[in-house]
Every structure is written in structure tokens, then in C-alpha cells.
Amino acid sequence: MLYHFIGIKGSGMASLAEIVNDRGDEVNGSDIEKYIFTQKPLEERGIQITGFDEKNIVEGSTIIIGNAFHEDNPEVKRALELKAENKATVYWYHEFLGQLVQEYTSVSVAGTHGKTTTTGMLSHVMSLVAPTGYLIGDGTGEMPENSKYFVLESCEYQRHFLAYEPQYAIITNIELDHVDYYKDMADYCNAFETFANQVKKGVVIFGDDESTRSLNVNTAHLYYGLHDDNDVQAVNIVQGEDGMSFDVLYKKNLFGSFKLPFVGKPLLWNSLGVIALGIMEGLRAEVLQNGLESFPGVKRRFTIEENHGNIYIDDYAHHPTAVKYMIEAAKIKYPGKKIIALFKPDRYSRIYYFMDRFAKELDAADEVYLCHFPENAAKEEGIDITIDDLAKLSSKAKVIKEDEEAAKMLASRGPAVYLFMSSKDIYKLKNVVKSFQ
């Protein structure tokens, strides 16, 4: 069977294409010409990537359309024409994924923050138990032969995750996002409540969050977190430069002691979510301990490089809460070092809605540099702002271009811990800065 992916370089689409390829089917895809880091694992599998052309859409094939694309794309238009004529099978990304989850013991990882890391952690742990497939929002996916489990990152944007009816789910937290689609917090929470109640076996839910606690969940569930009223609770937490340790209580009884090679509250919470899911699935503490301690991390999530006394941390952080915890974690891991925060926005609506909070959280760094909106940033009607508007609210921010002159200036500010934060391609600036040090 031939599968063609329209928008194959998208992070979820690339991951899904890798999975379909691993299952033994022929895969190709199309996208823009610009190099995107997600295409590397596609190329390593020999998956052909071309530009958009309606000739790529052939009768008898299965076509999967990325959710960012519409009928103004020539391939989408042609695919929908063939579908109407019953000459091709056509799915949107979330529709196809919704069918795939039914073939495995599936776990959907949802939430505003922490989805990617939690998905990576859980898939790593479950692979110690049985062959495990995974779809991660960093552009990586895999489906080993005879897989029992399938762990997938599940995005709430436009309620796409409601296409999935998994065996299990993790809800990492709920904080209003995607304000271009959701009307308000009640609308946002409603999506998660609907999602939780269509899970078949059980849901583990972050319990230190008013919003998650407000959900009316009828599915079997456990709460996890740091507060005493959680079913799965972390206590005796110690964090330092080399990582963290803590004990886990299940129903007030000691379940196990854990050591992790990373720092920061978000990673502690993510680990607890994995432990809670493991408890629900009946895993032994030893399996969870070994899996979490050996977890190598995921792409663009607190990814650390070092060069001549400088630290470069690349992260997908694009929400003020994520920025806050990034800076906090850097201060824990590198006490006393200068922290330089670099941020590149993605959506105009996100910056407009959270502008005050972005300014506040960024100012926790020693120095702050802001990049301009990329040309392809989603710009919603009625929102007319520039990055200078955010800079005016910050006591430290300076606006820079992503060019060689700026890279040289940034390099001269070291030695330091450089935090490169964006859902866009800020990692390219990181590579240039690094070359000058």
C-alpha cells in the first residue's frame, strides 16, 4: 500500500510517516523546500520528499493530510477530488491516528505543557516491558515489529485529540492556550473533559491543578502530584546540579525511591505521570526506576550542548509558563552562572494574549533577547503587534535580528548559559552563536 503525506515535515506528520514506514508500507510525502530538522529521520528511512504538486496524488493510494493544510493547496484539492470519486482513501492526520490507536494498547498523552517529554519518557519505560511504538511531537516516531503498546502525543488544538479513543491517557496539566480557537477557559476544559471520558480503561491526571481537578471524569482515574490529596505523590524531593531524587507514595504507602538525571518541577511532574500510569498498568517499581533513570530525553526539550565554558540549551518553550520553568531549571542546574534568554515568537495571538506574562517570566533571566516574528507566523485578524510591543514591557529585553552580527554580539556576552526558546527554528541562531565561541 502506498501512503502519501501532504506536509510530511510537520512534527506530527513526520512521526506518523516513520511509523507507517516501520509497519512495512511504502511511504512518500511532500512539503516546502526549506530544510526542517524533522526530515532527517525520514531521509534515514529512505522516504522520498518532494515539493507540492497535484501529480503526487495518485489513484488507489492512501493520502494523509497535515492539519495545517487546506484546499488552497493543490495536493489537498486533488486528494479530495479523488476521495469524492472513490478513487483514493483520504484522511486528515488526526483521523488516521484515531484509527491507528485502536490496533494497540494505546496511551494518549495530553495537556498544555509536558506532552512531548512525558510521551518520550513513557515510551522508553514501556519498551522495557514489551515492544512499544511511539509518536512524539519532536518529529520522531517508531513502531517496532510486534508492538504491544503505542504511546502518542495528543494535541488539543481544534479538539483534534477527540479523534482518539485510547486505552489509557495522561493529562499533564491544563492552562489556557490556542486562544485563536478556544473561546475561554471553560471551553478549553470542556475539550479535556470530553477527551478523558472517552478513554476506555483509565486516566492519570495531574492533581495539583485547579483546572484538572475541575473536570468531571467518569473513567477510572488516578491523580498524581506533590499535594497530599493525590493518589500518587512525590515526597522527600531533593534537586541539585546532577539531577533529583524523591520517594513516591501510592495511596499513602511507599511505592519506591527514584533518582533522575534532570532537574526542574516540570520534569518531576512528568515523571510522576509516567509512574502513575505504570501503577495503573501494574508495572513494578523497579521497571519504572530503571526506565526513568536511563531516559535519554527528547529533541528540543532542554537539550544541552557545551562549548568552551558556554552552555547552550535548546527548548520548544513557546508559552510563558514553559519559559518560567525553563529559566528556573537552568538556575538550579547551573547555580551562579549568567542566564541569557533568547525567545522567538510563533503565533501573534499567543503573544498578544500573554504579553504581560511573557515579559515577566523572561525578565527572570540576566539578559533577554527577542527575535522578530517569522514570516510564516500565524497572524489572526484584528491583532496588530510586533515584537517591539513585548520588548517595551520588559525591563531587560533587546530586539535582535537573526544574523551574523547578532550572533557575534551574543557570543561576546559569554561565558553564560544560553536558553534558546521557541517552537520555531531558533536553534539555527544557536548554531551560529556557538560557531563564534
Image: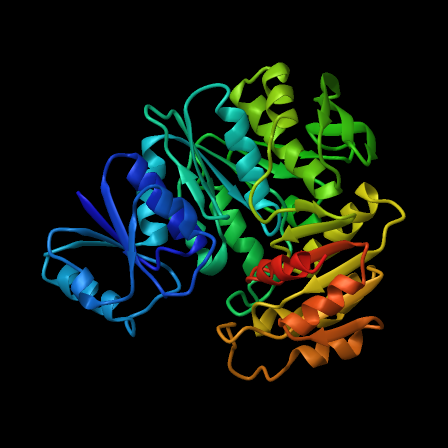
* Residue 204 locus on image (x, y percent): 58, 34
* Residue 170 locus on image (x, y percent): 55, 38
413 or 156: nearer the eye? 413
User: In the rendered image, is residue 16 in sight?
Assistant: no
Horizontal placement of 239 versus 96: left or right? right
User: In the rendered image, is residue 183 in sight?
Assistant: yes
Q: Residue at x 55, y 73 (%)?
A: 374
Displayed quadrant of residue 294? top right
* Residue 139 locus on image (x, y percent): 46, 48
Displayed quadrant of residue 15? top left
Q: Image quadrant for the N terminus?
A: top left
Residue 306 versus residue 292 in the image, above or below: below
291 or 406: nearer the eye? 406
Q: Residue at x 56, y 41 (%)?
A: 298
- Hey, which residue is sitting farthest right in the picture? 336
Residue 74 versus residue 134 in the image, above or below: below
Horizontal placement of 427 versus 152: left or right? right
Residue 242 versus residue 209 in the image, above or below: above
* Residue 190 locus on image (x, y percent): 53, 54
Q: How many marks?
A: 0
Horizontal placement of 288 versus 93: left or right? right
Displayed quadrant of residue 64? bottom left
Residue 328 versus residue 52 in the image, above or below: above
Q: Image quadrant for the C terminus?
A: bottom right
Q: Residue at x 42, y 65 (%)?
A: 34
221 or 204: nearer the eye? 204
The image's colouring method is rainbow
